[in-house]
Image: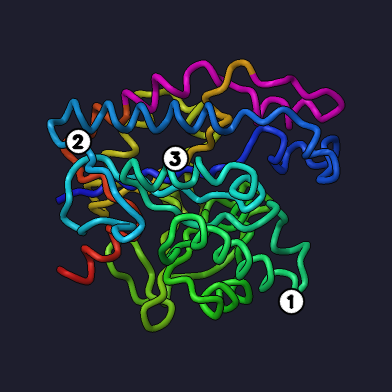
Amino acid sequence: MRHLLITVDVEDWFQVENFRDCIPFSSWPSCQMRVEQNTHVLLDLFDSAAEKSGQPNAPRTSRDCAGPSNSRGLHATFFVLGWIARRLPSLVREIQSRGHEVASHGENHFLHYDCSGEKLKEDLSDSKKLLEDIIGCEVHGYRAPSFSIDYDALKLIKDCGYHYDSSFNSFGGNARYGKMDLSGRERVGIAYKLADAFYELPISNIPVGRQSLPVGGGGYFRVIPAPLMRWCIRRILENERAYLFYIHPWEIDLGQPRVQGCSRLSRYRHYANLHKTLPKLSGLIDTFRDCCFNSCRQYLESLSAG
């Protein structure tokens, strides 16, 4: 069985790192929140895809957080920012009730490099407890803002009670991404076992020499032509039997405000091809409908069961 893991970083348009210099954290409460409506569009797309496959997601309660590993349908993982969860707890519960995994994206989208060890530990613990209080069960996964991960942060993530991290992006063209060498680590599927019952689930890219072609999602998904994306995903699935994809709710939002005062590159990264994202995502799901669309937690459980 081939696995396609869809992950969603639940943050709003004004919280992205590209706009940090012109939209400071202190101004967030005054910004127009659009994440709820955009997340519902993604949830509806996933429901529609599951129903079209003849295997709709079963509704879940707080006592059934991830569902059995072999359950069919379309189950994604939503890495929810704590700042969002505090204001929209009903959205977090809706994600879970629609059959998906709720995981943590931290509290306030601060890069790990900008946090002291104690501040990061507090961020990790608080965001986990917040989400668990909302959904009524354990949160297993974490993703660092802007993939700003390193080994020191991974140790804190494990110490705070998470069972997996999904923050490593091997693409070297973005200075914010963490730099780690996982080549000597035990591999299980596409996951790396870093400690007893603790795993790293990296973003899926294609190695090209010593570099990587970034085909795991986000802005790269929006600008890479669909035929090339499909070819890359097929290659990854043939070699790895699993592909991990990420997207943000704001990437499907054509009506979001246009930010002024930031660099041309930042604007391009954020706004390029927003109109193509939703149809491309729908096409991706349809093209690879023979895959098993499991959450990150379900995928790791399937590896253990195998």
Say the numbered circle drawn on residue 56: 2
**Does any portion of residue 187 appear in the rendered image?**
yes
3D distance between C-alphas at marks 2 and 3: 28 Å
Question: Which element is circle 1 on?
Answer: helix
* Residue in view at x 42 percent, y 30 percent: 42
In the rendered view, does 29 fall on the left or right side of 163? right
x, y percent for residue 188: 29, 69
Check the image and report above or below for 202 versus 253.
below
x, y percent for residue 159: 55, 80
Question: Which element is circle 2 on?
Answer: loop
Residue 274 magenta-highlighted:
yes
Q: Earlier in the sequence, mark 2 or mark 3?
A: 2
* Residue in view at x 21 percent, y 63 percent: 302
Q: Is the magenta stretch mostly helix, strand or loop?
A: helix
Task: Single out the mark in the foreground, 2 or 3.
Answer: 2
Say the numbered circle drawn on residue 118: 1
| Label 3 crowd (10 A; few <14 / some 14-19 / many >=20) | many
* Residue in view at x 38 percent, y 52 percent: 101
| Label 1 crowd (10 A; few <14 / some 14-19 / many >=20) | few
Q: What stretch is highlighted in magenta?
A: 256-283
In the rendered view, does 156 fall on the left or right side of 92? right
- Residue at numbered disc 3: 215
Q: Three-letter amino acid code at disc 1?
A: Glu
- Image quarter hosting the C terminus: bottom left
**Does any portion of residue 210 appear in the rendered image?**
no
Question: Which element is circle 3 on?
Answer: loop
